Image (tube, rainbow, N blue to C red):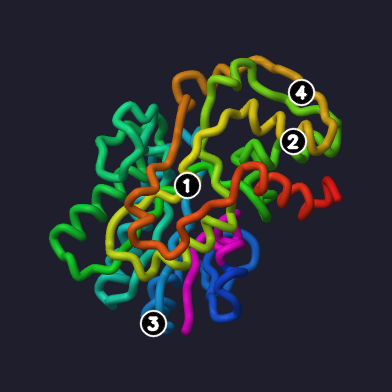
Amino acid sequence: MSFIVTGANGFIGKNLCEALGPDVKTCDVVGKFDIPSSKLKEAIMDIQPECVFHLGAISSTTESDIFKICENNILLSTKLFNVCSNLNIPLVYASSASIYGEGTQGFQEHVMTTPMNYYAISKDCFDRFVTKKVKDNPRLQVVGLRYFNVYGHNEDSKKDMASPVHKFLKSASKTKTIKLFKGSEKFYRDFVDIRDVVSLTVESQKFKSGIYNIGSGKARTFLEVAKIIKNLTNADIQYIDFPKHLEGKYQNYTCSDNGKINKVAKQKSRFSLEEGIRNVAITKGYIY
């Protein structure tokens, strides 16, 4: 049994590789890896893995170079799709909840999407390609996972794109202060623990082809996150102005509809935000 994981040195990638064990072959453009991206096609043909998990992408929601985004998030993904489909190898790839935009149509997988930035547009585009391909050829084994706001162990590599859980805990530990945007009580996110994400991602290779949400199914505010961490660390909350560059590109509300995935996944429950944050704080040594 063998697997290939692209984006293996990223946040979700590292955790997924740990779960898959020694039989995983890694592919990335940074850090240590087994397969260079330029040799990925040949590696898939040679190894014939049980499944390819495609997590590699330009993941910055503020990236504005559309050629760079299209090349990495659309063209590379379509090439990988073609290789896997021609060899009848299951493909599981990372989509994103950012494709729902403001969520005015809800958060079920079939609704009209309204992406608000170039990253989200690229993810939406590939989802549409896959949906059409699966409709044309139901025998294909390809699963897209719309990850909501994932947080947990191994987030250091995400830097500016790290979750507020990671940023707030780090700040609370170093400065005893949590910097929070003004109006954060109005911004809701579906925060989902990396342990749930990894478990469902591994399981998804057996799902029926299609797009699935991966979230907690509950919306919580940034202020709630800050208060949970404040109570754990005794840090103070400091309010700061909302950044100009995020205006008009920032979702007000996300909440995964887990109806579809819960019909096919063995795992139905999710860690609560309180449980997840406490686990991260203990793992990082911020609390004991």
Asked if the residue at tag 1 contacts the one at tag 4, i.e. Cβ–Cβ closer than 8 Å, the answer is no
Spot occupied by residue 132 in the image (x, y as percentages of width and height)? 18, 53
Query: Closer to the camera: disc 1 or disc 3?
Result: 1
Q: Name the residue under label 4.
A: 237
Q: As shown in the figure, which amino acid type bears the numbered disc 4?
A: Ile
What is the C-alpha distance between the residues marked 1 and 3? 31 Å
* Earlier sequence position, callout 4 versus callout 2: 2
- Reading the image, the residue beneath label 1 is 215
Percent position (x, y) of residue 242? 60, 17
Precedes in sequence: disc 1 or disc 2: 1
Up/down of 62 relative to 52, above or below: above
The alpha-carbon separation of the residues under discs 4 and 3 comes to 51 Å
Q: How far apart are marks 4 and 1 (CA)?
A: 27 Å
Q: Where is residue 237 in the image (x, y as percent from the top left)?
A: 76, 23
To which residue does mark 3 refer? Answer: 48
Amino acid type at circle 2 is Ile
Residue 167's spot in the image, x, y percent?
Answer: 70, 37
State the residue at coordinates (45%, 72%): 39
Task: Tell me which label, 4 or 3, sits earlier in the chain.
Answer: 3
The answer to whether 103 appears left or right of 190 in the picture is left
Marks 1 & 3, CB-CB < 8 Å contact: no
142 in relation to 220, above or below: below
Three-letter code, disc 1: Gly
Which residues lie in the magenta part?
A: 1-16
